Amino acid sequence: MARITEIRSTSRPIRVKNRTALEYSQNEKYFSIWVQSAGQEGESSLHPLDIQLDREMAAQLCSRLHSFLSDTKDEAFY
């Protein structure tokens, strides 16, 4: 599991090819995220990209997500 120590913006293109599930867990120190392999939502296999956020990084991510959600006025969520 990798502890995130920096969050930065990028202009990489976003391509959505599949849907999958995200799992999370938290304790008093970390917020952890695991991503299921695409199409394996009912399985126990996890994608190798597993991350942990401490409170500082979680606050930064929360701020960026809030900005993203604030800019999404007319788009449908699925």
Image (tube, rainbow, N blue to C red):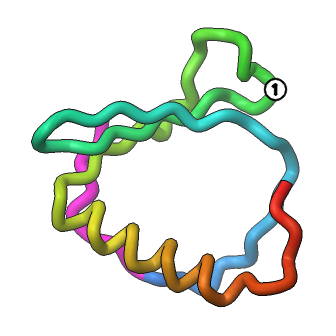
| Viewer-proximal residue among 21 and 73 | 73
Can you give x and y, in whole percent of width and height, for residue 1 in the image?
A: 30, 34
Residue 14's place in the image compared with 67, above or below, is: above
- Measuring 52% from the left and 85% from the top, which residue is drawn there? 67
List x then y, in percent, for residue 37. Answer: 68, 28
Magenta stretch, residue numbers: 1-8
The residue shown at (28%, 35%) is 26
Foreground of the two, 29 or 18: 29
- Residue at 38 percent across and 68 percent down: it is 61
Element at label 1: loop
Vertical relation: 15 (above or below) 51: below
User: Residue 63 vs residue 58: left or right?
Assistant: right
Would you name the residue on which mark 1 appears? Answer: 39
16 or 73, nearer to the observer: 73
Rendering quarter of residue 6? bottom left
On screen, residue 72 versus residue 60, left or right, reads right
Name the amino acid, label 1.
Gly
Quadrant occupied by the C terminus: bottom right
Residue 56: horizontal and vertical position, in percent? 17, 66
Q: Is residue 64 above or below residue 24?
A: below
Q: Is residue 54 left or right of residue 36?
A: left
Main secondary structure along the magenta-highlighted residues = loop
Q: Nearer the viewer, residue 10 or 74?
A: 74
In the picture as drawn, the residue positioned furthest to the left comes out as: 29
Magenta-span inclusion, residue 25: no
